[in-house]
Structure formats: C-alpha cells, structure tokens
Amino acid sequence: MSKDYLKIIQQSQVPSHVAIIMDGNGRWAKKHGKDRIEGHKAGVESVRNAVKASIECGVKYLTLYAFSTENWNRPKEEVDALMELLVFAIETEVSELNKNNIKLTTIGDIKQLPEKCYQSLINSIELLKNNTQLTLILALNYSSKWEITHACKLIAQKVKDGFLEPENITPQIIEQHLNTANIPDPELIIRTSGEYRISNFLLWQAAYTEFYFTPIYWPEFTKEEFYKAIMDFQKRERRFGKTSEQIQSEHK
Ligand code: FPP
C-alpha cells in the first residue's frame, strides 16, 4: 500500500525539510481506555514510521516537536514518564539510526533536561554525527519565542562587545543565531489530531511553509499518512509573494 503512494510521489518535488507537530497521544490513549503515557509509547512507533517514510521518499531533514517549553506544565508524573520514554527510545533506536545513516540533532534548551536525558542525547548525537542520509531534529524543551529571544541575546552581546553594528543586523544574521542555523526552512509542517495551531513552533522558519492538518491522532500516523501529506504538498503552488503567472512562466 505505501509502495503505491511512493510511486505517485514526484521525486523531484519532495520537500527537503518536513517538520511535524505530533499531537493527539493523550486523546488516542483515552479513546482506547489507556493511560496518557501509553499514548506516548504508541507514538514512538509513529516516530519510527515517519523516519522510515522520510528516508524512502528522499526527505533530508525531519524535525519532530517532542517536548515544548510549555510541556513542563503537565502533571509531574507525565513529564517524568515522557523523559524516561525519550531516553529509552533514543538508547534502543540509536544503532538502527546508525545503520540507516541517520544523523541526530536537537533544537531547544536541552541543557535544562534531566541529566540522564541530556547525556543520552549528547552521546547519540556524537555517535551519529557523520551520517548523511537524513538529519533527524528533535525539538526538545523548545519554543520559538525562547529560540528567538536566545538569538536576540547572542546578537546583543556581539553588539555590546563591538563585533557587530546594529545597522548590519539582517534576517541572515538573525537566522545564523537561531538553533536552526545551517538547516533549511521546512517546506512542509504537518500537525496531527485535528488542531489548527502552530503552538510556538518554528515561527521564524515557517514564514513560507505549507501546512498540512490531519484529524488522525499521532499514534495512528502511518507511512501512508506521511505520503498523503507529501502528495498534498505537491499539489500546492508555492508563490513566495509572487503572482501565479510569474511562477508559471518561470517553470516554462
Ligand atoms: C502530544 O500529544 C505529544 C507529545 C507532547 C509528546 C510526543 C512524544 C512522543 C511521541 C514520544 C517520544 C518521542 C521521540 C522523538 C522518541 P498530547 O499528549 O498533547 O496529546 P493530547 O493533545 O491528545 O492530550
């Protein structure tokens, strides 16, 4: 079934960077009479599916919103269980990631994560750093407002120290100080579970991103669902502020 979708996808038009707001684990668990953490555990299988599908169709960067700065406000037991799950998932998957030539990186303030989680991430990032097939970017303790504020502080310090003049601050300078420096902006952001929000995710980077919303809860998000999002993306006309006529004449 997923092979049929793969045949329809135009290889030349696959987005190089796809980002996903993985939502609906809690509601999926409730629907099945399970604890919320069971929903997160089931969500790990969908993470595997999204990674496999990205590789199969040629996506080069996959960003997953795994834990936002706002998620600390959840009940302590859920936060603790999520952190444990994260360590467990990273440690059990790292050799598979390596076998598949996948590089791992993070965005967000990971130093504030529990020590075990932080160390596990640092070790895996180091082990996988030379891989080239796909870059898997985990957004952890991430929020866009935090990231932009952090970039402002770094830039302000450079101005204060005399390394940069205020009139030389450009969008490119700001981008170089974001966590996503050297990562292309996402062409496609997917959000599951029927919510239509961006929730403090990649606000700067999403200036020209296409959005795909699906009512499917994250634990139900299969490779086929991923391919459907890619196919929907391929029907869009990306104009970047230009007219439709200009875009069509550029493609002649
Ligand atoms: C949103 O569902 C999901 C999260 C905040 C956590 C996502 C984490 C995982 C899928 C597990 C591990 C991840 C990796 C990268 C190995 P929700 O709890 O907000 O669902 P709800 O809106 O239905 O309550």
Image (cartoon, rainbow, N blue to C red):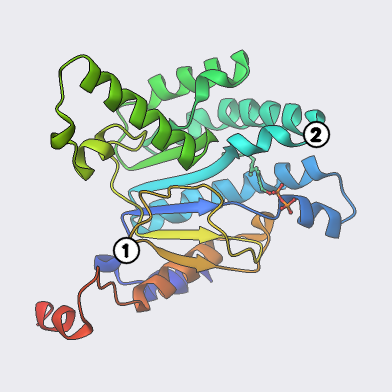
Image coordinates for residue 158, horizontal then vertical, percent: 23, 20
Name the residue rendered at 18%, 32% in the picture. 166
Location of residue 215 with respect to 167 vertically, above or below: below
In-image side of 117 versus 144 (left or right): right
Q: Which quarter of the figure is the C terminus placed in?
A: bottom left
Q: Nearer the viewer, mark 2 or mark 1?
A: 2
Which one is nearer the viewer's eye here, 110 or 1? 110
Residue hosting label 2:
75
Image coordinates for residue 183, horizontal then vertical, percent: 30, 41
Which one is nearer the viewer's eye here, 99 or 115? 115
At mark 2, the secondary structure is loop
Question: Which of marks 1 and 2 precedes in the sequence?
Answer: 1
Residue 147, labelled with which disc? Answer: none
Amino acid carrying label 1: it is Val
Q: Quadrant of residue 244?
A: bottom left
On whether ligand 1 comes within 8 Å of the CB at mark 1, the answer is: no
Q: Which quarter of the figure is the N terminus placed in?
A: bottom right
Name the residue rendered at 37%, 61% in the picture. 209
Name the residue rendered at 43%, 39% in the picture. 137
Name the residue rendered at 20%, 74% in the picture. 242
Image coordinates for residue 174, horizontal then vertical, percent: 27, 38
Residue hosting label 1:
14
Neighbor class of circle 1 (other Cα within 10 Å; few <14, some 14-19, many 20+) is many
Location of residue 70 with respect to 116 vertically, above or below: below
Image coordinates for residue 184, horizontal then vertical, percent: 28, 47
